[in-house]
Image: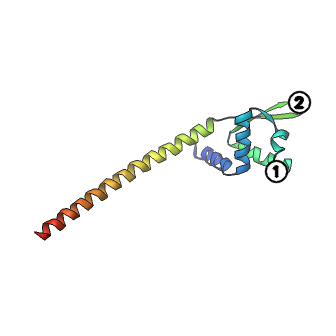
Amino acid sequence: MQPQTLDHVMLALADPTRRAILDRLQREGEARVTDLAAPFAVSLNAVSKHIRLLERASLVRRRRSGREHFLSFNPAPLDEAAAWIEEKRAFWTKRLDALERALVEDDAAKQRLRKGRKR
């Protein structure tokens, strides 16, 4: 995933309104923009701005039929972001496991040293 694409996905997911839009599209499938905007206590223009951010992140697809605009959910960018997150998690898990082993070995060495001094 390109860094800019990842930035767009993370920015899109950072807002609860955008996450709610994605949840609705995922659960119920394709929906008109006006229907997606209905449950929110903000203007249609404000919801349209949220939708533009979701489109920029490629999380939604727009289809036009006459004057109506329909949106559908595109999970591919989430899969790519999840893969990036998993890569970072695996890296840090490996590093932290190595740190834990080093600390355990250091502690064991200190205990052996203390036992040697007591004799």
The answer to whether residue 1 is visible is no
Q: Nearer the viewer, mark 2 or mark 1?
A: 1
Q: Quadrant of residue 1?
A: top right
The image shows residue 101 at horizontal and vertical percentages of 31, 53
Q: Nearer the viewer, residue 68 or 112?
A: 112
Q: Which residue has dot 2 on it?
A: 66
Q: Determine whether the residue tagged by mark 1 lies in a helix, strand or loop.
A: helix
Residue type beneath disc 1? Ala
- The residue sitting at 36% across, 51% down in the picture is 97
- The residue sitting at 17% across, 65% down in the picture is 113
Outermost residue toward the top in this view:
65
Q: Nearer the viewer, residue 89 or 9?
A: 89
Upstream in sequence: badge 2 or badge 1 = 1
Applied colour scheme: rainbow
- The residue sitting at 58% across, 46% down in the picture is 3
Cα separation, mark 2 vs mark 1, equals 22 Å
The image shows residue 63 at horizontal and vertical percentages of 79, 31
* Figure check: 107 above or below 58: below
Residue type beneath disc 2? Gly
10 Å crowding of disc 2: few (<14), some (14-19), many (20+): few
Q: Are marks 2 and 1 in contact (CB under 8 Å)?
A: no
Horizontally, is 106 left or right of 1 in the view?
left
Q: Which residue has dot 1 on it?
A: 46
Horizontally, is 25 left or right of 104 in the view?
right
Q: Nearer the viewer, residue 74 or 55?
A: 74
The answer to whether residue 69 is visible is yes
The image shows residue 119 at horizontal and vertical percentages of 10, 69
Outermost residue toward the right in this view:
67
Horizontally, is 21 left or right of 35 in the view?
left
Outermost residue toward the bottom in this view:
118
Q: Determine whether the residue tagged by mark 2 lies in a helix, strand or loop.
A: loop
